Amino acid sequence: MNEALAGIAPGNGETVVVGMSGGVDSSVSALLLKQAGYKVVGLFMKNWEDDDTDDYCSTRQDLIDAVSAADVIGMDLEVVNFSAEYKDRVFASFLREYQAGRTPNPDVLCNAEIKFTAFLDHAMQLGATRIATGHYAQVREFDRSFQLLKGEDGTKDQSYFLHRLNQAQLSRTMFPVGHLYKRDVRRIAADAGLANAAKKDSTGICFVGERPFREFLQRYLPVTPGEIRDLDSERVLGRHDGLMYHTIGQRKGLGIGGLKGMADDSGEHEAWYSARKDMEKNVLYVVRGHDHPALLSGSLVASDLSWVSGRPPHTHWVYAAKTRYRQPDAPCSIDAVDGARCEIVFAEPQWAVTPGQSVVVYESKVCLGGGIITGATPAT
C-alpha cells in the first residue's frame, strides 16, 4: 500500500470531495486519500433522469455500490442532481452535433462542463479545497503552472477526455489512481474488502446506457432516410435511415453487404465503409476496402480550441496527436494556430478522421489540449 500512496501528497486533514461513480477506480481514489490523511467526502452525481430504468441505465446499482464503498472506507456520501446542467451544457450540444452530421464525444464535454465545473463549484461550497476523481491521468506542477499528464497505465490513460481542463481546474484536482495500473487498483480494492473490486468498467455513452443507439436518437431527432451511394461510381447501393446514425469509417450496420457485381478482380467482396456525408443532398457515400484513399487524411482542421496552459503550442514543432480515444499517438506538427482554429499535419496518413470528434495534442506524456475536428484533407 505504501507504493500506492507514494504518488499522493500527505493530506494533513485537508478536505477533498471525491466524485464517486460506484466503480472501483473512484472508490480506491477515496480510499487512498483517506489513508493519506485527507478528510474525504464522497459525491455521487446524478446526471440523467429521462428513462433511467434498470433496463437501460445502471444509476441505481451504481449508487448502491458507491454507498457500500463509502461505508467500508468510513466516509460521508452526498448525492447531487446535475441533470438540468447536463441537459443544457452537454446533451443539447450532443443533439446539435448529430443533427449537423458530426459525431460528437459527450464524455469530453461532460468532464469540462459537469465533473470539473458544476461538481467543482459544488465541492467548494461544501468547504473542500480540492476535488478528486478516478480518472487515469496525472497532474504535475511545473514552472509555475499545472500540466496534465497521461496516466501511468497506458492501456487505461484517460487524458484524452480531460484535455479541455484549464489551469484553475487542474490546480484544484487530484487523480489518486493516475500513477497506478488497473490491476493494482483492483488488488487494493479487494484487499480493502470493497464489493466493487471486480466490477466491470463502464463503456459507451452514459445517458444512452444499454439501449440501442438508433432507438435512442429517434426519440429526439427526426428520421430522414436517404440514398447510400458508391463514392467512386455514384451508383446507388441502398438507403440509409438517417445520416445521424452513421460515422466516418463505419463498417457494420450499412445494410449493403454482399451486393451482386461488386467483387474485385479476385472474386472477393471487400467490406464497405462509410466515407462521406452530403448533408445538403442527404446522401451517405461509401467506399470499398479499409485502406481506400477516401478514408485516409494527411491533415485536419480543428476549432473550439482549448489549451491546458492557456497558451497555444508552438507551430512547426514535432508533437503527437490522437483523433480518437485508444488510437496510438501519431507524430504531427501544428502548421497554423490562432484563437479560433488550428491546422494539424500528420507524418503518416490517419484513418477515418471524423468531424465532431476531438483531436488531442501531446508532447511526450504531457497533454497540451486540442479541439473539435471540423474537416480533414485527403492524404496525397
Image (tube, grey):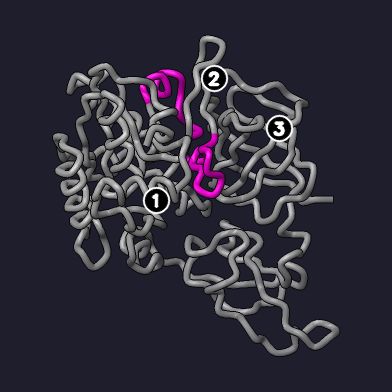
Residue at x 19% of width, y 19% of height? 127
User: Is 88 one of the magenta-colored residues?
Assistant: no
Q: Is residue 174 left or right of residue 267?
A: left
- Going by the image, does 340 lie left or right of 76? right
Residue 303 x/y as whole percent: 58, 34
Quarter containing the N terminus:
top left
Q: Tell me the magenta residue range.
A: 150-173
The correct choice, above or below, for 269 with respect to 251 in the image is: below
Read off the residue under disc 1.
95
The mark nearer the N terminus, 3 or 1, is: 1
Amino acid at the residue labelled 3: Tyr
Residue 46's x, y, as percent? Answer: 22, 45
Residue to which mark 2 is pinned: 309
Question: Helix, strand, or loop for circle 1?
Answer: helix
Residue count near mark 2 (Cα–Cα under 10 Å), binned few <14, some 14–19, many ≥20: some
Q: At label 1, which amino acid type do we have?
A: Leu
